[in-house]
């Protein structure tokens, strides 16, 4: 049976730890921690934060890899009535400074080996009062430093600071593919509703175990932790997918049942599978989000995960998850990302705000308790994203992404608004061209953009990464495209590159593709 009603994110930990304190909660860095240990450490760190002056509504930034410190810190922050901000460990000083200043974070919790990024900017962050670090507190620093070991050894805050579901629980900074940093502000209500809705449609229960290779700064990875605590199951934390062999070993060693990834990770996994066949019979759920999963990946994924249900999904940080496709429909609804998640609604509107007919492209709008409160300190951008809804005062999320919907109500991703290519008087989806390219033998990844053209308005340019050992000329790729795509969708230009620029969450950064240059192919 699933656990009972929960109103606040940290109540999931309180509930689970009291029901099953000896159950495994987190497996990280070859260490195993129980729910009793997680609750005790979080309560003690919460007590430390309160003693340091953290109050209800304050923000605490966590600058760390996927590790025990990260999990303890986010629950400790929530117990103080504060909101956590998970910062990707690859973040550099200037970007970190922006996030700390923009959020007004009062405390930074960090791993000491990331000091080259956080120490130089501490003196410039006026609101920041203290640093909790794994390093030596005697080291020179612009702010007071408390050792993390001391923070989780102090007096426990046994009674969390009173909080209601409308209070802010987290700020997740996202740049999408544009590079502009925005703090997506999420309430407890947003996050509790979302984790329960996703648990429902993924058909999860206490018999499962997550493996997470995605950064916790990415909501996809964060919810792997949150849903595990909600269910009282273990989550295996890996720092990344940079060393696939280690990840595979951990999957087998800990009999992981849920594996979530993005297309770039699946591409790496299938490359390894092509050289030496892989199989993970323990895995029973495979999920994809962040970018559309190429249909050509599905047969091989079924070989790798023979006992798994494959869920194709779509979402934005602004609502975490919006659409999902039942795994039984993957073959009968190719290209679809399904219908709205339980308890929500989705519909398409024209740029003028009018409904569009089945089969016509429109902009996806999302309605439900999972829609963000807004962008932190960004009223104009919030107004652009949150539009008037069905009822007075209601706001729905305008995703600015283009979709089509069939007569049965299933949605199909077309393109981001900024990515649509307008060529020869027609609108072309770069995603459709990219999927056709990666389905071709010898091509691992592809990124497609429109570039200025005197005659066409925009010409289609494809940046292509080849499989190891493959030898394909741009002309040969264009000829293969002509066999699979309409003439106006065939790239006028093809550029062979070693790698594609990506966001921290693994999406291709189309806006950065021109920086790779054009070799004239």
Image (cartoon, rainbow, N blue to C red):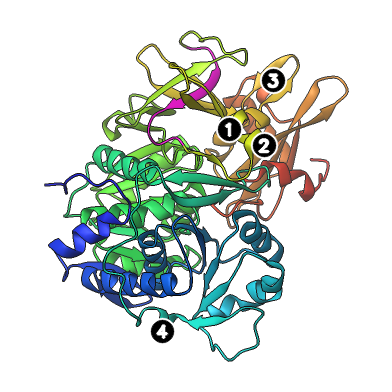
Rendered-image quadrant of the C terminus: top right
Residue 243 colored magenta? no
Coordinates of residue 201 in the picture (x, y in percent)? 27, 37
Left or right: where 160 falls relative to 412: left
Residues in magenta? 359-371
Residue contact at pointers 3 and 1, CB within 8 angstroms? no
Coordinates of residue 1 in the picture (x, y in percent)? 11, 47
Reading the chain from its start, which is encountered first: label 2 or label 1?
1
Residue at the spot of label 2: 448
- Tag 1 secondary structure: helix
Reading the chain from its start, which is encountered first: label 4 or label 1?
4
Residue at the spot of label 1: 431
Give the residue furthest to the right.
Answer: 454
Residue contact at pointers 4 and 1, CB within 8 angstroms? no
Residue at the spot of label 4: 150
Give the residue furthest to the left.
Answer: 1
């Amino acid at each position: 049976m699933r656990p009972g009603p929960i109103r606040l994110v940290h109540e999931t930990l309180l509930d689970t730890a009291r029901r099953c304190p000896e159950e495994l909660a987190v497996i990280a860095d070859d260490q195993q921690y129980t729910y009793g240990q997680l609750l005790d450490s979080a309560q003690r760190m919460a007590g430390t934060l309160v003693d340091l002056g953290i109050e209800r509504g304050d923000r605490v930034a966590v600058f760390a890899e996927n590790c025990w410190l990260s999990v303890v810190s986010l629950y400790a922050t929530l117990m103080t009535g504060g909101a956590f901000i998970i910062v990707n460990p690859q973040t550099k000083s200037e970007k970190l400074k922006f996030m700390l200043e923009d959020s007004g974070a009062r405390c930074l919790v960090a791993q000491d080996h990331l000091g080259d990024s956080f120490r130089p900017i501490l003196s410039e962050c006026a609101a920041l009062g203290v640093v909790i670090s794994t390093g030596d507190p005697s080291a020179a620093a612009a702010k007071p430093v408390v050792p993390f070991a001391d923070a989780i050894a102090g007096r426990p805050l046994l009674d969390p600071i009173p909080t209601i579901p409308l209070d802010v629980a987290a700020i997740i900074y996202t740049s999408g593919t544009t590079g502009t940093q925005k703090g997506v502000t999420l309430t407890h209500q947003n996050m509790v509703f979302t984790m329960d809705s996703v648990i429902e449609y993924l058909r999860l229960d206490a018999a499962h175990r997550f493996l997470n290779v995605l950064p916790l700064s990415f909501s996809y990875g964060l919810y792997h932790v949150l849903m595990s605590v909600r269910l009282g199951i273990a989550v295996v934390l890996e720092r990344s997918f940079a060393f696939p062999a280690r990840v595979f070993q951990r999957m087998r060693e800990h009999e992981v049942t849920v594996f979530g990834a993005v297309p770039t990770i699946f591409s790496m996994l299938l490359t390894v599978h092509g050289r030496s066949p892989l199989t993970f019979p323990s895995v029973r759920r495979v999920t994809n989000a962040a970018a559309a999963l190429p249909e050509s990946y599905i047969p091989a994924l079924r070989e790798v995960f023979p006992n798994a249900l494959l869920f194709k999904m779509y979402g934005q940080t602004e609502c975490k998850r919006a659409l999902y496709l039942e795994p039984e429909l993957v073959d009968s609804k190719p290209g679809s990302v399904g219908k709205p998640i339980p308890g929500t609604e989705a519909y398409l509107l024209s740029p003028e705000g009018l409904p569009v007919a089945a089969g016509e492209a429109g902009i996806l709008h999302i309605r439900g308790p999972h829609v963000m409160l807004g962008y932190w300190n960004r009223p104009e951008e919030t107004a652009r994203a949150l539009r008037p809804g069905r009822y007075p005062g209601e706001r729905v999320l305008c995703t600015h992404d283009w979709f089509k919907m069939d007569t049965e109500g299933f949605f199909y991703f077309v393109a981001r608004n900024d990515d649509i290519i307008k060529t020869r008087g027609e609108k072309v989806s770069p995603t459709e061209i990219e999927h056709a390219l990666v389905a071709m033998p010898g091509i691992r990844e592809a990124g497609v953009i429109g570039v200025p053209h005197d005659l066409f308005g925009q010409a289609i340019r494809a940046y292509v990464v080849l499989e190891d050992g493959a030898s394909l000329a741009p002309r040969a790729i264009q000829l293969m495209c002509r066999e699979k795509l309409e003439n106006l969708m065939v790239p006028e230009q093809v550029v062979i590159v070693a790698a594609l620029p990506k966001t921290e969450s693994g999406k291709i950064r189309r806006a950065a593709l021109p920086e790779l240059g054009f070799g004239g192919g």
